[in-house]
Image (cartoon, helix red, strand yellow):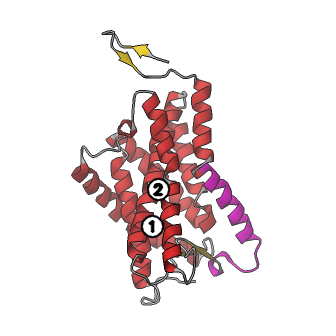
Amino acid sequence: MTGTTGTGSEVGVERVSRRTLRDETLLVLGVSLGASAVAAVISFVGSLTRPGGLKDQAATLNASAAPGRPWLDLAWQLFGIASALVPVLLVAHFLTREGGSLRTLGLDRTRPWQDLGRGAAVAAVIGSTGIAFYLAARGLGFNLTVVPEALPDVWWKFPVLILSAAQNAVVEEVIVLGYLLHRLGGLGWSPGAALAASAVLRGSYHLYQGIGGFVGNMVMGVVFVLLYRRWGRVGPLVAAHTLLDVGAFVGYALLAGRVDWLPTA
């Protein structure tokens, strides 16, 4: 459907109903983090009903997809990273149809150093408190032992871990932060209800890690929503999330088995 501006110039902006926007939001979540939340709940139920405590079980991220076959493993790793970004492209498509883009959410290259600086500050605060919270939750039996990476020691290990961290950050912050708040606001949700929905969703798809993973990430979700509304940009939060995951993935690879305080499976 083609509309016109006040000056008479044509723009390719399609007007869609609230019901269509609602359905599109549900579909985006259904092929991305909403589905991850359902899988995490099922995984958590499985962990609760398995013999032994939660801390005696492990949740492994970035595992080998083809043990003993490094080139095939690399192909699977890159495929997984690329395919996980498809929902972000879907979000970009829906925003473009409205006459916007990912820039509408504040994901662009207009303020790279400011975004990185803010992201680094957020990561420094959340990273230190997050590690302490995880260790405490695991010690109390509320969390599984999280194994951030279990890749073979090959040349592509660290580049893949960094790409995985960036992919996680882009998918989560674009969808559960920028896009979801943008849509819920347009559908008439109150700021408080939208904040709660975003934070609970973030906690839910981390439930596979245990109760600690749920609570910790829900709190992080509240902080990220407040910062997003203050700055009006998702870019700093993408940077913060990337740095947090790089620290977790690469840090674990370098420190596991070498320090006493870091739990391993």
Q: Quadrant of residue 55?
A: bottom right
Residue 105, position in %: x, y? 39, 39
Residue drawn 57% across and 30% down? 21
Residue carrying label 2: 220
Amino acid tagged 2:
Met
Closer to the camera in the image, 204 or 166 = 166
Answer few, some or many: residues within 10 Å of disc 2's Cα (few below 14, many 20 plus, some between 14 and 19).
some
The secondary structure type at the circle numbered 2 is helix
Instruction: Return the mark for residue 63.
Output: none
Residue drawn 49% across and 34% down? 94
Vertical arrangement, residue 261 with respect to residue 49, above or below: below
Residue drawn 57% across and 37% down? 25
Closer to the camera in the image, 39 or 219 = 39
Q: Are marks 1 and 2 in contact (CB under 8 Å)?
A: yes
Vertical arrangement, residue 111 with respect to residue 77, above or below: above
Note whether residue 155 is visible.
yes
Q: Which region of the structure is painted magenta? A: 34-56
Closer to the camera in the image, 132 or 18 = 18
* CA gap, disc 1 and disc 2: 9 Å
Residue 185, position in %: x, y? 49, 31
Amino acid tagged 1:
Gly
Residue 1, position in %: x, y? 50, 18
Residue carrying label 1: 130
Relative placement, left or right, of 128 versus 139 is left
Vertical arrangement, residue 96 with respect to residue 79, above or below: above
Note whether residue 148 is visible.
no
Q: Does the magenta stretch include residue 43?
A: yes
Residue 125, position in %: x, y? 35, 63
